[in-house]
Amino acid sequence: MGKGEQTRAAVLDVAAAQVSVIGLSGLSIGLLAERTRLSKSGLFSHFRSKEQLQLDVIDWTAELFAERVVRPALKAPRGEARLREFFDRKLRWDSGDLALPGGCFFYSVSAELDDAPPGPVRDRFLQAYRDYIDAIVTVFRTGITEGQFRPDADPEQYAFDIQGVLMAFHHASRLLGDDRAEARARAAFEALLDGARI
């Protein structure tokens, strides 16, 4: 990585952490200049506009999620072991162990953009979020192929259910401060697996 790329990566790390706390609409080149101690003109040369900054931070965080959650999970054996690894890594992402400070970027932004009109930023975020859901569907589907889950199990329904568990964990742990949130999420995950097994 050249110096310019290193600077850009460092800025996007800070931007992603800020978005998790203040949302995309609160993110600005001025705020990043203050947080990174770089000049506004220097930052502007990297991003050119607030919209481009928002698009780049979505792409950056989606790649970070793939690097820390999806790709390592895909190294686990196909089927239930892979699903367990994905779930465990997503819990760690939501709790901040694998994510940037400030909580889950995706939950923060989804609350902000759910009613926003279509446009480049919302469309880019929706694609990143759909890619994440598709990863759960694909991992579950391999469990069916491997003969570990019922052939009539619905991968899309499972992804919906597991996402509900993960969102409940996020809110219980971060908003409510429930020290049993992880245990409850893991119990719900086991119940979903029990219902899917042959």
Image (tube, rainbow, N blue to C red):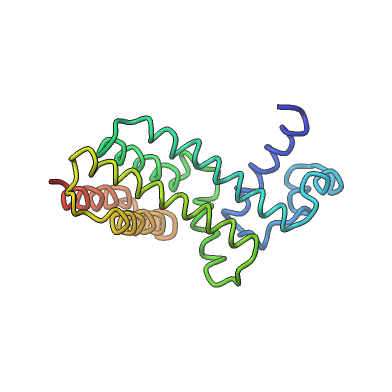
Residue nearest the observer in this picture, 18 or 116: 116
- Residue 190 percent location from the top left of the image: 21, 47
- Residue 96 percent location from the top left of the image: 48, 44
Report the residue that reaches farthest toward the top: 1
Residue nearest the observer in this picture, 123 or 186: 123
Query: Is 148 left or right of 88, judged from the image as shown?
Result: left
Report the residue that reaches farthest toward the left: 198
Residue located 61% across and 59% down the image: 23
Query: Is 7 left or right of 73, judged from the image as shown?
Result: right
Query: Is 108 left or right of 49, judged from the image as shown?
Result: left
- Residue 71 percent location from the top left of the image: 44, 35
Where, by quadrant of the figure, is residue 147 drawn?
top left
Query: Is 184 left or right of 38, judged from the image as shown?
Result: left
Report the residue that reaches farthest toward the right: 41
Residue located 42% across and 32% down the image: 72
Residue located 47% across and 55% down the image: 130
Does residue 177 lie above or below 73 as drawn?
below
